[in-house]
Image: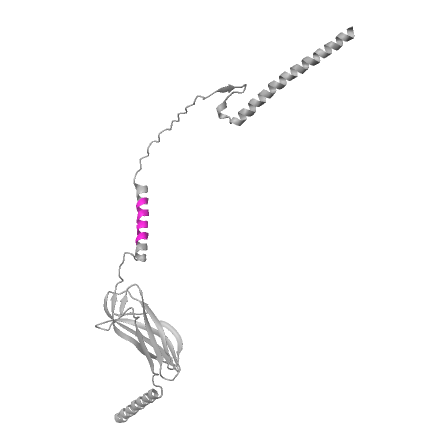
């Protein structure tokens, strides 16, 4: 009885193994090549903390089947123990990989780790006929470094300016609020008005006096000529009135005679 049960179990396991092997042979993993590299300006594979680090991933479909690129992801591991320190950004695409066409994809991530050597792993996931596969694109040791400090760094200068402005405003508020201020007495202003004596010839009238030197010269000429004309006209009028009077008196005398 036990022998029959054992034999049945062995036959079932063998059948399952054959079925899995046939399934793998019928649906082999599509041949998709993937590589990743840092830009030429970063020849030493440095990952800078606090900055955007970019790699270029090249994917090529060699399977002759319909392959769709699903996503690109990565992880940062300990270089000695291979313990995962942090999973990096996962970028979704959902684009087809055309047969024998190299597709270049930028992949960026940020790092905030202790400077030193770490292991960086980047892979891409693709699907074929409903099945999902994973292809490794990058697996190497990289060096994490801190950004270089410079006195001409605009971000650093702006940060210092903002901090200095905040501290200055806080100190002024404390000084104005808690430090007593002594008010100085205001000195009274005295105004000394000096009246200057008139200079030159002053001609007085009924309303008041004026100084001729303040009057423009052409106005003085006009006023003098007007006075002369008035004097002449007054004399001629008196003479005419005297002549008329003598004429009338002569007529009266003739009438009496």
When asked about the image quadrant of residue 91, the answer is bottom left
At x 25%, y 74%, the residue is: 140
At x 32%, y 88%, the residue is: 21
At x 39%, y 74%, the residue is: 93
When asked about the image quadrant of residue 189, the answer is top left
Q: Is residue 248 above or below residue 171?
A: above
Q: Is residue 255 above or below residue 38?
A: above
* Front one among 13 and 179: 179
* Front one among 126 and 81: 126
Q: Residue extending furthest top? A: 257
* Front one among 126 and 149: 149
Q: Position of residue 55 (x, y in %)?
A: 32, 71
Q: Position of residue 86 (x, y in %)?
A: 28, 69
Q: Position of residue 203 (x, y in %)?
A: 51, 19
Visual colour scheme: one colour
The magenta stretch spans residue 179: no
Magenta stretch: dominant SS? helix
Q: Is residue 232 left or right of residue 94?
A: right
The magenta stretch spans residue 162: yes
* Front one among 62 and 167: 62
Q: Residue extending furthest left? A: 80
Give, as a single range, the part of the protein colored magenta. Answer: 160-172
Q: Is residue 155 above or below residue 23?
A: above
User: Split into 4 quadrants, where in the image is the C terminus?
Assistant: top right
At x 55%, y 22%, the residue is: 224
When asked about the image quadrant of residue 130, the answer is bottom left
Q: Position of residue 207 (x, y in %)?
A: 54, 20
Total marks in image: 0
User: Split into 4 quadrants, where in the image is the N terminus?
Assistant: bottom left
């Amino acid at each position: 009885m036990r022998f029959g049960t054992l034999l049945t179990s062995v036959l079932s396991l063998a059948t399952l193994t054959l079925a899995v092997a046939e399934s793998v042979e019928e649906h082999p993993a599509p041949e998709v090549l993937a590589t990743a590299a840092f830009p030429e300006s970063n020849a030493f594979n440095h990952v800078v903390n606090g900055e955007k680090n970019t790699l270029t991933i090249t994917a090529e479909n060699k399977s002759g089947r319909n392959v769709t690129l699903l996503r690109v992801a990565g992880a940062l591991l300990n270089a000695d123990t291979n313990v995962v320190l942090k999973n990096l950004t996962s970028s979704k695409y959902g684009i087809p990989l055309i047969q024998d066409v190299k597709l270049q994809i930028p992949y960026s991530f940020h790092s905030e780790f202790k400077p030193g050597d770490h292991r960086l792993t980047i892979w891409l996931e693709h699907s074929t006929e409903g099945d999902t596969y994973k292809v490794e694109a990058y697996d190497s040791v990289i060096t994490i470094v801190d950004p270089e400090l410079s006195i001409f760094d605009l971000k650093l200068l702006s940060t210092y300016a903002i901090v200095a402005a905040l501290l200055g405003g806080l100190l002024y508020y404390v000084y104005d609020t808690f430090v007593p201020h002594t008010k100085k007495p205001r000195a009274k202003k005295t105004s000394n008005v000096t009246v200057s004596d008139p200079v030159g010839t002053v001609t007085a009238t009924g309303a008041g006096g004026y100084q001729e030197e303040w009057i423009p010269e052409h106005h003085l000429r006009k006023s003098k000529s007007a006075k002369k004309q008035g004097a002449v006209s007054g004399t001629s009028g008196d003479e005419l009135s005297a002549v008329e009077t003598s004429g009338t008196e002569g007529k009266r005398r003739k009438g009496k005679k």
